[in-house]
Amino acid sequence: MTDVREQPTWSPWRTVVWFGVVSLAADMVYEGARSITGPFLASLGASALVVGVVTGAGEAAALVLRLWSGPLADRSGRYWALTIVGYGLTVVCVPLMAVAPFLGGAGLAFGATMVLLERTGKAIRSPSKSALLAHAARSVGRGRGFAVHKALDQVGAFAGPLVVAGMVALTTHTWAGLAALAVPGVIALVLLAVIRARVPDMTVYDEPEAPLTSATGVRVGAPTKLPRDFRLFALSCAASTLGLMTFGIIGFHLADANLVRPALVPVVYAVAMGVEAISALATGFAYDRIGAKVLLVLPFLVAAVPLLALDDRLGLALTGVVVWGAAVGVQDSTVKALVADLVPSGRLATAYGVFAAFQGAAALAGGALAGWLYSGGRLDLVVVLGACQAVSLVLLAVVLRRRG
């Protein structure tokens, strides 16, 4: 990179929107798979604990490994290459999950491996993709930019589970729904290549800053350590993630308690994805208008999830799914705007990687914790996860107060 920037061929909003369309297609793939992961692994012989560990470990892989991929992107400047490789892993691994039922006793191990590899693909691409998007969204408002991107992303997250549900209903085989997700995966890669050709350097959307080094893209004189406020915010979100159950556990409960037929679990997940999109838009636009204090709603949403979603009454359980979707909408979108505002632009991918590592460690512990407490006593689960949100709220309040 140099400090001489060419005029972009696309407007910032056009780039943000097309990035959102890529995520739309990609989300059809991996959210379609995630919507059925709990019942799918159960059909291969997994217990609630195994589902919790695999899905928790998957989220951990998707997050913790960004501690490596984020700094790698900033050091090498290969944001686009890492983004494309990461998406490629998802496009390959999800359809391969369809092979698991035909492998006999090895099916569960193979299916779990594909879940983990798909999440690894997300780890590889996410810091680079978020850094690229942060550059594109800078001039339109990062709250709005991330919100619009997330809303488009969630259209795919809504459509993917419906595709899976339709294929399962049509064929009575979950593997058929997973195999069908190869189509939107290929579309995502093609669209990504188009954006790469149009805007190879996303820093063209940035305002002029201090000179950049040609090798890494990190500003000369930029601090080697990430700011303290960023670290406190990462800890706050980690505590929040520790208490936010994966949908694998929620889906397992819906099927195990005979509240929803397994074939309809993806439909419930699709509804949650629709709520997530609305939540991301609402809090993202509010972030640009009233600031980061909008994030104070997150711990309260997360604390309500186990209380509602694990109830044995269908109405309350579905209400819990809606609250879960709202919480994930804030956690996966609006929090990223504050991350970008807390760190230097040349350290964005590193910051997103470190931030995700905090969340990933919490996701691994949280997945196992939720699976264990689910079997032993749901009141204990509600209390323990609620305590995590109290810690998250205190840390977030400290960050907001320090920012003035």
Image (cartoon, grey):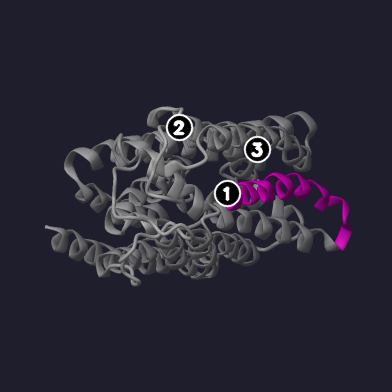
Q: Position of residue 97 (x, y in %)?
A: 76, 50
Separation of disc 1 and disc 3 at Cα?
Answer: 10 Å
The magenta-colored residue range is 81-105
Q: Is residue 106 left or right of residue 161?
A: right
**Residue farthest toward the left in the current orientation of the protein:** 404
Q: Around disc 2, counting alpha carbons within 10 Å, would you say few (fewer than 14), some (14 to 19), or many (20 or more)?
A: many
Label 1 CA crowd tier, 10 Å (few <14, some 14–19, many 20+): many
Q: Nearer the viewer, residue 55 or 41?
A: 55
Q: Is residue 248 visible?
A: no
Tell me which residue sits at (72%, 50%) in the image.
Answer: 93
Tell which of 56 and 306 is nearer to you. Answer: 56
Q: Amino acid at mark 3?
A: Leu
Label 1 sits on residue: 83
**Mark 2–mark 1 distance (CA, rounded to whole Å):** 15 Å
In this picture, is 149 found above or below 109? above
Dot label at residue 15: 2
Location of residue 111 in the rendering, given as x and y in whole percent from the top left corner: 75, 56
Residue 222 badge: none
The amino acid marked with disc number 2 is: Thr
Secondary structure state at the residue bearing disc 2? helix
Count of numbered tags: 3
* Dot 1 or dot 3, earlier in sequence: 1
Residue 165, above or below 222: above
Which residue is label 3 attached to? Answer: 189
